[in-house]
Image (cartoon, rainbow, N blue to C red):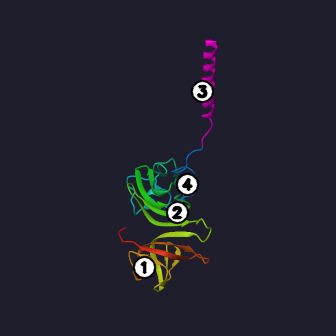
Amino acid sequence: MVVLRRCAVISSWTAILFAVACGSSSPTSPIRGFGGGATGVVIDGTVNGGSQGLTASAGASATSPETFATTPGKPVTVTVVGTSISTTVDGRGHFHLRDVPLGDVQLRFVADNVDATITLRDIEAGDQIHIRVRVTDTSVRIEAETRERKRDDDDDDDNEVKGVVSGLTGTCPAIAFAVNGTNITTDGSTRFEDGTCASVQNGRRVEVKGLRQSNNTVLATKVELEDDDD
């Protein structure tokens, strides 16, 4: 009887171990972005004005993108630092990244003799980000940035545009101007930060958040004026 009980105990442990092993063999879904799950964040970029490539050589310069275009070399890769999200700049100087993590994100540009990083801040779920960057051997600079975000209530898009003011018209508080090809308008409810409505001038760098209108303009809810050296 003692032998039989020991056999029964051994059999029970064997069954448990077998069940655990079988249970752990089921596949798991890969984690995409921080916290798991797709973030819906897309970053579309243009490098050096869309000229071919960043095939960097020791003689390449920030002011001569054609130098990159005429020097054969390693293609430029763009990687979201700390993740496996990566892509290659295509023949038109464009790149596309999907499901980018939320929060502050670093993009790293690497090629022959090129290793440079930029930071995009305050990325939120659903952001559609469009950037134009200038890359040199050891540095990268954002020349223009536009963000669009789909709101949960399916109302108008909540848009964010960064860049330099041009084509300013009107009288405060109702003024109109363009930023990176996006037409902006303001009204009495627009909030201005680090300045006033009168501080908006052609050539001034601003960050605008607002609602897309039926005529494709953006009615600004907030205009933040940036220092010239930002």
Question: From mark 4 to mark 3, how far is it between C-alphas?
Answer: 38 Å
Q: Is residue 120 above or below residue 12?
A: below
Report the residue marked by disc 4: 99
Q: Which residue is mark 2?
A: 129
Q: Amino acid at mark 3?
A: Leu
Q: 66 and 175: which one is in front?
A: 175
Q: Are marks 1 and 2 in contact (CB under 8 Å)?
A: no
Instruction: Say whether disc 3 or disc 2 marks the residue closer to the N-terminus.
Output: 3
Q: Residue 23's spot in the image, x, y percent? A: 62, 34
Could you tell me the amino acid type at mark 4? Asp
On the image, numbered disc 1 is attached to which residue?
A: 202
- Disc 1 is placed on an element classified as loop
Mark in front: 3 vs 2: 3
> Could you tell me if residue 16 is visible in this image?
yes
The tag earlier along the polypeptide, 2 or 4, is 4
Dot 4 lies on which element? loop
Cα–Cα span, label 1 and label 2: 24 Å
**Which numbered disc flags the more N-terminal residue, 1 or 4?**
4
Q: Secondary structure at mark 3?
A: helix
Q: Identify which residue, 139 or 127, lies in the foreground.
A: 127
Q: Which residue is mark 3?
A: 17
Q: Within 10 Å of the Cα at label 2, are there few (<14), some (14-19), or many (20+) other Cα atoms? A: many
Occupied quadrant, residue 148: bottom right
Q: Is residue 45 above or below residue 216?
A: above
